[in-house]
Image (cartoon, helix red, strand yellow):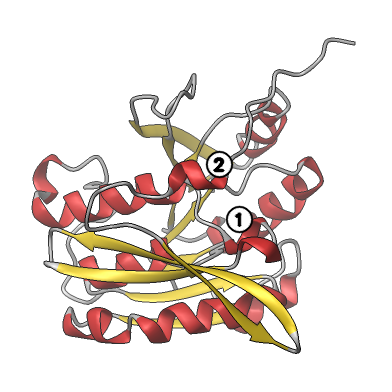
């Protein structure tokens, strides 16, 4: 069997290195156990404000920042500055009302929070139930920045592949976003099923930022193309020693 080429996963390569955007590390005590926290500052040029995101590295990958998320954040920031030349312009078309955005697999919530802050959108952050408390923390920590742009952020648990979870949050969204959600192959089918429930029969666009790490990821895209039209909106230049850059895909449900 051919061995899969794997790229080393290091969440700390995603940490911003600008002088004003250094991560702040410290330890807190909760339930008598030490827990390392990283507070990551990200300055948004488009609104001249800073969002602060709490990471909890010891809690797992859902509590850490990844390159795909920061790439999508930069695209959202640049879109606010120059929407005409933005690769996201067709997906984030101007509307008379605030866009309703759902984020899947939100992790730290940075993408959804920045979407609310830069677009003035009404955003719902979702992830597994045990991740939601940190989403709540980050949403509340940035409430002032989001509110000043007219946006809102809410949060809810959403397990992929569970129709009842989708029913709880509804399907009334304009755009769905996600970053780095194609990694564990046992989650390919549940993710596709959730996307089917949300996209099929609706005029909803799904924007997915992705970094290729394993050959097996082609299985996800082959399965997804049975239900969705998929095209590429943007490709980042590789950095931090990576062989490939972040790719932003657009999914639209087939009728």
Question: Disc 1 vs disc 2: Cβ atoms closer than 8 Å?
Answer: yes
Q: Position of residue 246 (x, y in %)?
A: 43, 34
Label 2 residue SS: strand
Numbered circle sitting on residue 228: 2
Q: Is residue 170 left or right of residue 197?
A: left
Residue at horizontal 62 percent and vertical 61 percent from the top: 57
Q: Is residue 1 left or right of residue 236?
A: right
Q: Is residue 208 visible?
A: no
- Mark 1 and mark 2: span between their CA atoms? 9 Å
Residue at horizontal 32 percent and vertical 64 percent from the top: 41
Q: Is residue 165 left or right of residue 202?
A: right
Residue at horizontal 53 percent and vertical 64 percent from the top: 106
Residue neighbourhood size for the residue with mark 2, other residues' Cα within 10 Å, grouped as few (<14), some (14–19), many (≥20)? many
Q: Position of residue 223 (x, y in %)?
A: 70, 35
Q: Which residue is mark 1?
A: 195
- Mark in the foreground, 1 or 2: 1
Q: Position of residue 94 (x, y in %)?
A: 17, 61
């Amino acid at each position: 069997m051919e061995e899969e080429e794997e790229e080393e996963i290091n969440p700390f390569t995603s940490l911003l290195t600008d002088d004003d955007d250094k991560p702040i590390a410290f330890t807190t005590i909760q339930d008598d156990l030490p827990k390392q926290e990283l507070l990551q500052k990200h300055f948004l040029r488009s609104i001249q404000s800073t969002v602060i995101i709490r990471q909890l590295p010891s809690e797992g990958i859902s509590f850490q920042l990844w390159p795909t998320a920061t790439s999508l954040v930069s695209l959202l920031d640049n879109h606010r500055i120059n929407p005409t030349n933005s690769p996201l312009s067709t997906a984030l078309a101007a509307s008379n009302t605030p866009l309703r955005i759902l984020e899947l697999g939100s992790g730290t919530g940075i993408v959804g929070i920045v979407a609310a802050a830069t677009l003035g959108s009404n955003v719902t952050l979702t992830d597994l139930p045990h991740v939601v408390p940190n989403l709540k923390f980050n949403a509340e920590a940035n409430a002032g920045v989001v509110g000043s742009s007219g946006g809102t952020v809410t949060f809810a648990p959403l397990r992929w592949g569970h129709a009842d979870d989708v029913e709880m949050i509804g399907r009334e969204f304009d755009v769905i976003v996600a970053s780095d959600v194609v990694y564990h192959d046992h989650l390919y089918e549940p993710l596709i099923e959730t996307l089917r429930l949300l996209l099929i029969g609706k005029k909803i666009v799904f924007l997915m930022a992705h970094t290729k790490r394993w050959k097996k990821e082609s299985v996800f895209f082959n399965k997804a193309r049975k239900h969705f039209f998929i095209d590429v909106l943007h490709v980042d230049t590789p950095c931090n020693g990576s062989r490939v850059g972040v790719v932003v895909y657009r999914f639209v449900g087939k009728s």
